[in-house]
Amino acid sequence: MKDIAYIDLKQCILQDNEDIANEVRDLTKEKKFFLWNIMSSPGAGKTTFILDVISRLNGKYSIGVIEGDIESTIDAEKMHRLGVPTVQLRTGGDCHLDAAMIKKALENLPLEELDIVIVENIGNLVCPAEFDLGADLPSMLLSVPEGDDKAIKYPLMFSVCDALMVTKIDALGLFEFDFDALEKNTRKINDNLRIFPLSAKTGKGMEVFIEWLCKKINSKKETF
Ligand SMILES: Nc1nc2c(ncn2[C@@H]2O[C@H](COP(=O)(O)OP(=O)(O)OP(=O)(O)O)[C@@H](O)[C@H]2O)c(=O)[nH]1
Ligand SMILES: [Mg+2]
């Protein structure tokens, strides 16, 4: 009798995604823009942070946004009100964005005019980490109320990111959050992860982050 045919669907899906992520990477070079993926749990502060970043980069770079949501256009409308070219990706239930969705969204942005495309991923600390989007900067937000132990509980997310923005530091007095513990937990998983404590509400820590971000963007620009 023939052996059981075994197809690892997850492997197939992730391989297909990687192929399209490479196409997206090529597109960023061809059209000369910086692609930035921002992930976090729901409500960590992605939209608030992105709005603040856009206002701080206003005039320096031309920015487009891809908003990923299971439902609604609430966040996309906030971006649109700033006059930023915006694409809403409604997944209708899927808890992550994949490279094919990004490729489609990019077809709807004026890439020739843009220096940066920011992706607000679906609020989820698990699935988005599995899908490479071809981004120059895969990053995550962790908000103070979520706690300092998340690197232990969601290691994949911390392992795939280059930057960790620890948000809502204005709320540090209300929650038990130990930065040394966060650093220790994180270093076990990703020694290269850059950690930025900040608050998009008060602006504390934002300048330091923006300075680092601009260096990243400019170093990619130099390769064009
Ligand atoms: N205190 C404080 N609150 C913040 C900060 N950033 C965001 N918030 C608040 O946190 C809540 C959620 O913020 P959002 O920016 O909508 O979070 P999000 O990650 O985009 O949420 P989803 O898109 O639903 O996953 C809002 O009430 C914000 O006002 C911050 O730095 N400090
Ligand atoms: Mg949001």
Image (tube, rainbow, N blue to C red):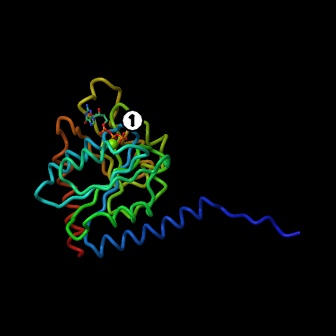
Question: What's the residue type where badge 1 is placed?
Answer: Asp
Q: Quadrant of ligand 2?
A: top left
- Residue 9 vertical position relative to residue 200 in the rendered view, above or below: below
Q: Quadrant of the N terminus?
A: bottom right
Q: Quadrant of the C terminus?
A: bottom left
Estimate the x, y position of residue 222 in percent, counting from the top left.
20, 72
Q: Can you tell me whether the CB of the residue at mark 1 lies under 8 Å from the nearest atom of ligand 1?
A: no
Residue 81 horizontal side relative to residue 135, left or right: left
Give me the residue at 33% from left, 26% from top: 175
| Number of numbered discs overlaid on the protein picture | 1
Give me the residue at 49% from left, 55% from top: 130
Q: Which image quadrant for residue 9? A: bottom right
- Residue 68 vertical position relative to residue 45 in the rendered view, above or below: below
Question: Which element carries disc 1, helix, strand or loop?
Answer: loop
Estimate the x, y position of residue 156 in percent, counting from the top left.
48, 50
Which residue occupies the extreme right position in the image? 1
Query: For the residue carrying disc 1, how many other residues have a C-alpha within 10 Å: few (<14), some (14-19), or many (20+)?
Result: many
In-front residue for pair 88/166: 88
Estimate the x, y position of residue 197 in percent, counting from the top left.
26, 41
